[in-house]
Every structure is written in C-alpha cells, then in structure tokens.
Amino acid sequence: MLSPVPGLTHLKVLTPGPPPAGATPPSPPPPTDGSQRRAEALVRIALEAAFGMRPLPQLKPAQFAAPVRLHASARQRQGIRGPVRVDTLHLRPGGEMFGTAVSAGRAHAFTARMAGRRLVSFRVL
C-alpha cells in the first residue's frame, strides 16, 4: 500500500499491508540450548579441515561421519588452502544448516546436517 510522505505531496512510500486473516505465523526460531554453539563449532572444524588448516585426523569418527571426512579429504586434494572464517550460519529445525564462509577473499557456500551431537553430512559448494 502506498502512503504519502508527510510534508511531500508527490512522494509516497510503500508500506506493508495487514496480514491476511488465514496467514500462518512464522516458524519459531531454532532452539538456543547450546545446539547452535555446538553446530558452529563442528562446522568451523570441518571447514578448517576442508581448507587445509587442520589435519584430517582431527575429524574424529565420534563427531564427524564418514561422508564428512571424505568430503574434507577431497577438498584438501583440490589444493585450495588458506585460513577460513564462517561468515553466516543458519540452523533449521531437524539439524539442517547452511551458510557462507570466506577464504582468501572468496565466499564459499556450505551445507551440513547434524544428528544428535554429530555432523553426518557436510558439503562446500
């Protein structure tokens, strides 16, 4: 809905209209019981291993599933190395994660999935 800007008769600003009567409310935010912090730590370790800043034996099977270790190993063989930092991280219900990481001035997208306290899937796109 366009509403006139006070004091300026020829300028209008777009204002959101009222929500429809049958609209569903937005989903609740993910739990903050430490799972966000745990997810960030596991993703940061996996990214550092994938970009060659950590040795692969630091990806312990108790915390990282075999596909995660395999993907990190494949990324190291590509020769892309350097410090990496997590820029954004979004955690969805069900353990799904996605975000961006920056290394050597380039942004890389990643996706991951947690089951319990273990990272079971991880990809740098």
Image (cartoon, helix red, strand yellow):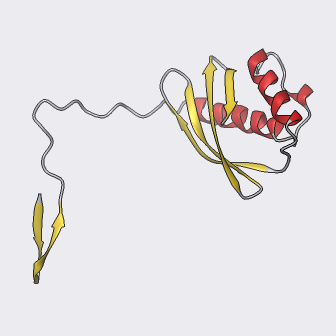
Residue 33 at x, y percent in the picture = 55, 30
> Which corner quadrant holds the N terminus?
bottom left
> In front: 60, or 17?
17
Residue 69 at x, y percent in the picture = 81, 23
Q: Residue at x 13, y 29 (%)?
A: 22
Q: Residue furthest front?
A: 78
Question: Residue 11, relative to residue 72: is it above or below?
Answer: below
Whether residue 84 is visible to the viewer of this picture, yes or no, is: yes
Q: Residue at x 72, y 31 (%)?
A: 42
Residue 24 left/right relative to 51 = left
Q: Residue at x 84, y 26 (%)?
A: 59
- Number of numbered discs visible in the structure rendering: 0
Residue 86 left/right relative to 4 = right
> In front: 11, or 6?
11
Image quarter of residue 99: top right
> Which corner quadrant holds the C terminus?
top right
